[in-house]
Image (cartoon, helix red, strand yellow):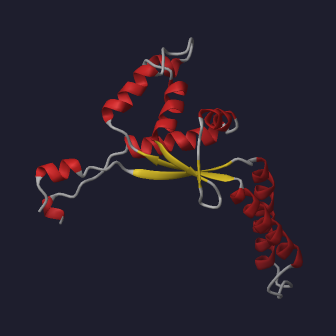
């Protein structure tokens, strides 16, 4: 059984990864293909004349989808995140600045949420990897470019990643459950 000091010194924060595709324009065509293929599969099942296993148009759409998804994957960065201490988390809130004028959410929490999450995302990022799995150095200039070129939904994905590693409840089994 580990000692209290071993337990304290062995503490580790939770981790997660978030994939961000930098070519979101490709997703529109992907959604079109998926809808077309879903409708085609329904037609194939409903129409008894379609006895053949594959409809050429659906085979072609699947090939295009496979190629498109591969291109999306090649333009995806994986953000590896870890939790931080409560003291550091609260310090980032204080450093994020005053609430933005007229922003009710900022006013309700007492700080600039946009700045806070940008700072938190950067701080919680352990590393960034490319499609090949290689680590990518994220300089301040790369961070700036990255944050300027992601959608609000992608920013929310990253924010949710920081929430997962910093704010989600971690259930600990009790002695009776072991």
Residue 109 visible to the viewer: no
Pick the quarter of the image with the N terminus.
bottom left
Q: Position of residue 71 (x, y in %)?
A: 76, 59
Between 48 and 80, the one lying in front of the other is 80
Q: Position of residue 39 (x, y in %)?
A: 79, 66
- The residue sitting at 51% across, 53% down in the picture is 17
Vertical position of residue 107 compared to residue 4: above or below:
above
Between 18 and 101, the one lying in front of the other is 18
- The residue sitting at 51% across, 39% down in the picture is 159
Vertical position of residue 144 compared to residue 138: above or below:
above
Q: Position of residue 58 (x, y in %)?
A: 83, 73
Q: Position of residue 155 (x, y in %)?
A: 59, 38
Dividing the picture into quarters, in which one does residue 41 lie? bottom right
- The residue sitting at 50% across, 21% down in the picture is 112
160 on left or right of 20: left
150 on left or right of 109: right
22 on left or right of 162: right
- The residue sitting at 59% across, 60% down in the picture is 133
């Amino acid at each position: 059984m580990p000692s209290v000091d071993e337990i304290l010194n062995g503490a580790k924060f939770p981790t997660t990864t978030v994939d961000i595709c930098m070519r979101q324009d490709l997703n529109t065509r992907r959604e079109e293909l998926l809808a077309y293929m879903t409708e085609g599969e329904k037609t194939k099942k409903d129409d008894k004349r379609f006895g053949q296993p594959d409809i050429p148009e659906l085979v072609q759409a699947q090939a295009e989808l496979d190629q498109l998804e591969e291109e999306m994957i090649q333009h995806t960065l994986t953000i590896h995140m870890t939790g931080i201490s409560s003291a550091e988390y609260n310090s980032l809130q204080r450093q994020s600045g005053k609430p933005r004028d007229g922003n009710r959410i900022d006013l309700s929490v007492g700080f600039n949420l946009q700045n806070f999450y940008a700072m938190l995302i950067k701080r919680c990022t352990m590393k960034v990897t490319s499609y090949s799995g290689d680590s990518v150095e994220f300089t301040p200039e790369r961070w700036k470019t990255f944050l300027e070129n992601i959608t609000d939904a992608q920013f929310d994905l990253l924010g949710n990643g920081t929430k997962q590693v910093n704010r989600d409840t971690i259930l600990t089994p009790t002695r009776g459950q072991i």
